[in-house]
Each structure stands twice: as structure tokens, then as C-alpha cells.
């Protein structure tokens, strides 16, 4: 089957790149100041294409080799879904603290190591770096603080943080995260609504998760993806006995926060605000993501987690989640959870935005 998927991966990657990049050319304002922004978008996009070819090829070759020794053993999976800015990151970090139970992919894996051999290589580099006092690790953290300084007030980024594993689909230019950089909203609609997504795309995602779990046996795979909120049926088909945590937050809080993020990055790359058509499409998608997780066959394996309870009574909510999943909470994690909960209660987001700044009422007045 992998021999059948590999040429599809290359075709999907190439076609999606050409389509999205071409669409982006028409998004730049016709002025001199757009030139450096165009160069930035072009360089990032071409780099993503080249590294994607590398990753796809290594994953393919490695999977052919692994197939000679049998498949990876089935493992339990938990997916945190719900519209972006609904507390998915907070819940993800709370659960990921229980490293005896869960395992999640970190950003360095998603960007640079989808294959087992790549993971082992970078883990080895990390051990050598640690032997010499972590100079490389400290340098990376220094660079991250400089590069992500403005963005971290919205969403903290870091190569060593657990992150949304849908990012791994950027190797096929089939991740909605890329909409922050290139392409029009309509070119991501089939992904956001899980409508007509090629089987080869889901196959690649499954293989990459399998690769992570080859090094983390006897654990539950923990995923957090707001952009998979409409994909619970496909995920249930890919991963047997999977369960879902649906983060529920009022749309009049979710939408302004997400629009603030979208507009920040759109201004960064294109020097202007997105037009009303794009904003309407974004809002429609948010509304779909909010309703989709509680519909369909996956409803029986989904627990609803209220954002307010997450911020006020996180220990109580996490206990409910563990009971729902049928997982016994260890004593060590219980103590860590209390500390995390105290920090969470005192945490105040640095993300500042006005709920009335985006004129969302004019896009869909019934929702606000």
C-alpha cells in the first residue's frame, strides 16, 4: 500500500504548493513595501516544499523497511478538539504533564523528524549537546525568544513544546496552519470540513503517529488539534477505540481571539487586513468546528469539557476526563496536577484584543 501512496504524496505536495503559492501572489498589495514580504513568503514556502520532499521520501523508505518486521501494535488515542482559542492548548498541556500515561509530539518532531530514524538522530544530537552543557539547546531558546517575541503573547511556540500534530501535514501542504502563510481560505475548506480529503493524506498522518509511538510504547497517544474538530469520523476510522475531549467555549469569546491571531499574521505576511469574504469564511468554519464534535457516531466517545471549568476548577475537570477515558491517575501526577492547577488559576493571558474590533456582528449577527 505504501508503494501506492508515495507517488500520491509527491503529487499532492507539489500540486498543493503550486496552487497555494499562486493564489498568494494575488494577495499582496501593489506597492513597494510588499516586495520584502513577498520574498519572505516565497522563501518560507520554497523551504517548506524542499524539506517536505525530504521527509516524504525518508518516511516512505523507512516504512517499507518496517513493513518487513510487521505492523506497530495498536495503541489507545485521545484527541482534544474544539474550535481554536477554546482552551485546547491549556487542556493539552495539563494532560501531557502525565508523561507516564500520555505521549505527544513536540514541534521539533513535526517540523524536522516525522521518521523514526530522524527522531533517533536528533535525540542523539540532544544527548551530545547535554554532555557539553546544552550550548545548542540554549542557543535555540535564545533565538525562539527573539523570533517569537510578539507571537508568544497569543500562542507560545517552541521546538521543545508539545504542539498540534496536524502541523505534520504541512509536508503535503494539507494543514490549515499554512493558511496563515499562503493560499485562500477556500483551498483549505475540504480539510476543515473533512470533505474529500485524499486517503493518502490520512495515511501519512497515521504513519507519522505510528512512528512516534514506536518510541513510546505502552502509552496513550495524546493529540490536540482544533483544526481536526470536523474530522472525528476519519480519526475514529484510523485509530480504533479512540476517544475525544471536546473543549466548549462561547463563540463570542472564541471568534474575536482567533480573528486577532489571523489578522496579526496576515498583516505580518501581506501588510494588510483580510477582506470581508475571507473573514466570513473563517467565521463559518469556526461555527462548524464548534458544532461538529457533538454530532455523528463519535458523540458516544466524546466528553464535553467546559472552558470556564478548565480555568476555575481544572483538577475537577481532569478527574472527569480520566474517569471517562477509564485511566487511573497516578499519585505522582496528582501532585503535579495540583501545582499546575494553581499556576493555571493565577495565569493571565498576555493576548490583548477587543471583542468588538472585528465587526463580527456584520458577518453573522445570529451568533453574537
Image: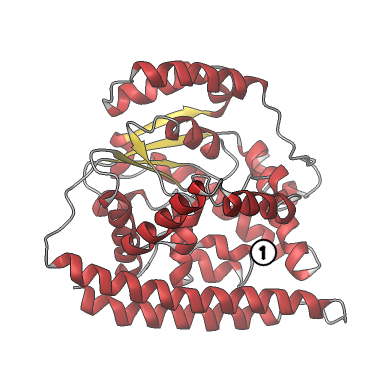
Position of the N terminus, as image quadrant, is bottom left
- The residue lying at 66 percent from left, 52 percent from top is 144
Whether 83 is drawn above or below 28: the answer is: above
- Residue 102 versus residue 367: which sits nearer the camera? 102
Answer whether residue 192 is visible to the viewer in this image: no
In the image, 349: left or right of 1? right
Question: Badge 1 is on which residue?
Answer: 278
- The residue lying at 47 percent from left, 63 percent from top is 112
Q: Position of residue 211 (x, y in %)?
A: 30, 57
Which residue appears farthest toward the right when viewing the image? 32
- Residue 319 versus residue 354: which sits nearer the camera? 319
In the image, 150: left or right of 57? right
The kind of secondary structure element at disc 1 is helix
Position of the C terminus, as image quadrant, is top right
- Residue 116 versus residue 20: which sits nearer the camera? 116
Q: Identify the image quadrant of residue 113.
A: bottom left
- The residue lying at 74 percent from left, 78 percent from top is 38
Q: Identify the image quadrant of residue 223.
A: top left
- Residue 262 versus residue 215: which sits nearer the camera? 215
Whether 200 is drawn above or below 311: the answer is: below
Q: Position of residue 365 (x, y in %)?
A: 69, 45
Figure colour scheme: secondary structure
Amino acid at each position: 500500500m505504501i508503494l501506492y501512496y508515495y507517488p500520491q504524496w509527491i503529487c499532492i505536495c507539489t500540486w498543493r504548493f503550486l496552487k497555494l503559492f499562486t493564489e498568494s501572489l494575488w494577495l499582496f498589495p501593489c506597492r513597494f513595501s510588499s516586495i520584502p514580504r513577498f520574498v519572505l513568503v516565497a522563501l518560507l514556502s520554497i523551504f517548506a516544499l524542499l524539506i517536505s520532499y525530504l521527509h516524504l521520501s525518508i518516511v516512505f523508505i523507512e516504512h517499507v523497511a518496517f513493513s518487513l518486521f510487521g505492523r506497530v501494535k495498536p495503541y489507545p488515542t485521545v484527541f482534544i478538539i474544539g474550535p481554536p482559542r477554546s482552551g485546547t492548548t491549556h487542556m493539552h498541556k495539563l494532560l501531557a504533564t502525565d508523561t507516564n500515561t500520555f505521549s505527544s509530539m513536540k514541534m521539533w518532531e513535526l517540523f524536522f523528524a516525522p521518521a523514526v530514524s530522524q527522531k533517533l538522530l536528533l535525540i542523539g544530537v540532544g544527548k551530545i549537546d547535554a554532555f557539553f552543557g546544552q550550548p545548542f539547546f540554549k542557543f535555540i531558546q535564545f533565538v525562539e525568544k527573539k523570533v517569537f517575541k510578539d507571537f508568544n503573547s497569543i500562542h507560545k511556540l517552541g521546538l521543545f513544546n508539545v504542539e498540534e500534530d496536524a502541523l505534520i501535514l504541512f509536508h503535503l501542504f494539507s494543514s490549515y496552519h499554512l493558511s496563515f502563510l499562503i493560499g485562500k481560505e477556500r483551498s483549505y475548506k475540504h480539510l476543515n470540513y473533512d470533505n474529500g480529503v485524499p486517503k493518502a493524506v490520512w495515511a501519512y498522518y497515521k504513519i507519522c503517529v505510528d512512528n512516534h509511538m514506536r518510541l513510546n510504547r505502552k502509552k496513550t497517544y495524546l493529540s490536540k488539534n482544533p483544526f481536526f474538530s470536523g474530522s472525528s469520523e476519519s480519526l475514529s476510522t484510523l485509530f480504533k477505540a479512540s476517544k475525544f475531549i471536546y473543549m466548549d467555549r462561547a463563540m463570542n469569546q472564541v471568534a474575536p481571539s482567533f480573528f486577532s491571531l489571523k489578522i496579526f499574521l496576515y498583516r505580518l505576511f501581506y501588510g494588510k487586513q483580510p477582506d470581508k469574504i475571507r473573514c466570513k469564511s473563517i467565521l463559518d468554519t469556526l461555527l462548524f468546528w464548534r458544532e461538529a464534535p457533538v454530532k455523528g457516531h463519535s458523540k458516544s466517545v466524546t466528553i464535553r469539557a467546559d472552558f470556564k471549568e478548565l480555568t476555575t476548577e481544572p483538577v475537577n475537570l481532569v478527574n472527569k476526563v480520566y474517569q471517562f477515558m477509564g485511566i487511573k491517575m497516578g499519585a505522582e501526577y496528582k501532585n503535579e496536577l495540583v501545582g499546575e492547577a494553581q499556576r493555571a488559576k493565577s495565569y493571565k493571558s498576555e493576548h490583548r484584543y477587543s471583542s468588538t474590533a472585528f465587526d463580527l456582528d456584520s458577518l453573522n449577527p445570529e451568533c453574537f
